Image (tube, grey):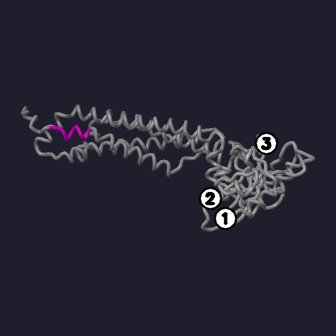
Amino acid sequence: MNLGAAEVRRAKLRFGLLTAAVSLLVFLVLLLTTLSNALIGSLTGALDALQADGLVYSTTARDNIVASRLDPATAQAVAAVPGVAAVGSVGTFTSRATMAGTTPDLQVFGFQPDAPGAPGGLSDGRLPAAPGETAVDGGGVAIGDTVTLEPTGIPLTVVGLLRGAQFNALPTAYVDLATYEEAISSANPGLPFVPVNAVAFDVEDGADATSVAASVAGAVQGATGYTREQAVALIPGISSISQSFGILVGLTFVIGIVVIGFFFLILTVQKLRSFTLLRAIGTPTRSLAATVALQITLVVLAASVIAVGLTLLAVQGLNTGLPVSLSPVLIAGTVAAVLAFSLLAGLLSIRRIARIDPATAVGAR
């Protein structure tokens, strides 16, 4: 073990360059994964954080809540499905809005307070409980600000701030269902009724959400049920985004492991004469293997510290409009995976050491 640390101290440039290369690869893995999580979260957060076990869309929605249209009476039919404990109507639309001195597109969700379908991710304040109130994720607003929906001119007072509850990568506002109905009616006068986009439901204790969701299609005409996880996974574009980022992260990870494995294999070949002499004087293979493992561990841990610092700087400097943050769980998981697979790659070097014949130290064959 002391031999491995001593060699690292003597060959600072060699191991420093390897550490720099590995730190850049770990940095790319962390940054790409963080950006992927932020992008997907901004597209799916509203449904992912929804306080419900499942959702019901119209059969013509093609698994998309935005394209779904349901009669408000559908909620009563869903409530009668065996295994359903409670239901709540959910509506959504996109509108221009005046907020924090800007006029961005705003995704608006209407929900019934104290019923399934309320938003999650409350970070400050409270959820809206009366007409004219809203809780917002994004847009740069603060509690007490006013958000005005255009072109209807409906003012909404911000009473809560959310995090991780955006949809379609837009600032997202949550209002009670009465405010949602008022906004739809004002923008579309003459509607016979205001449709909802979905019916959120909770299942009874002991009931399986997947089974209950599957039974909705047969029990409610013109409707299809999903668990919340299924609804999130089926949002258009999510699968392709996840696969694209997954390929990039996977390739970067593999390149990093290959670099570490071949570096130590080459290093081992260069030091075969030294290892042979050590074996000849009785140094066991496990001690030499521990030397390689120690060096790999030192390189990976030092590179990970540098990579985490670079990622934190990059995240703070990003101006993507997405809620980007570096997760401690992601850091721990990435470092552990890189270290574990690097040690596995180091088995190439250890295998080469184990095959050394100590007799060759004195020219015997």
Horizontal and vertical percent position of residue 238: 61, 41
Q: Residue at x 44, y 36 (%)?
A: 25
Of marks 1 and 2, which one's residue comes earlier in the chain?
Answer: 1
Front: mark 3 or 1: 1
Q: Is residue 350 visible?
A: yes
Point out which mark residue 211 bears. 2
Of marks 3 and 2, which one's residue comes earlier in the chain?
Answer: 3
Q: Is residue 123 visible?
A: no
Horizontal and vertical percent position of residue 335: 43, 46
Q: Nearer the viewer, residue 356 or 220?
A: 220
Stretch of the chain drawn in magenta = 349-356
Q: Which residue is mark 3?
A: 101
Q: Which type of secondary structure does the marked residue at label 2 adopt?
A: helix
Q: Residue at x 11, y 41 (%)?
A: 280
Examine the structure image and report whether residue 74 is included in the region drawn in magenta: no
Left or right of residue 135, residue 253 in this image = left
Examine the structure image and report whether residue 350 is included in the region drawn in magenta: yes
Q: Nearer the viewer, residue 275 or 228?
A: 228
Q: Callout 1: 10 Å neighbours few (<14), some, many (20+)?
A: many
Q: Which residue is mark 1?
A: 83
Q: Which type of secondary structure does the marked residue at label 1 adopt?
A: loop
Which amino acid lies under the numbered mark 2 shown in the image of this protein? Answer: Ser
Left or right of residue 126, residue 306 in this image = left
Horizontal and vertical percent position of residue 38: 60, 44
Q: Nearer the viewer, residue 16 or 191?
A: 191
Picture layout, residue 157 above or below residue 314? below
Q: Residue at x 74, y 63 (%)?
A: 79
Query: Whole-Å distance between the Cαs marked 3 and 2?
Result: 47 Å
Horizontal and vertical percent position of residue 302: 39, 43
Q: Callout 2: 10 Å neighbours few (<14), some, many (20+)?
A: some
Q: Callout 3: 10 Å neighbours few (<14), some, many (20+)?
A: few
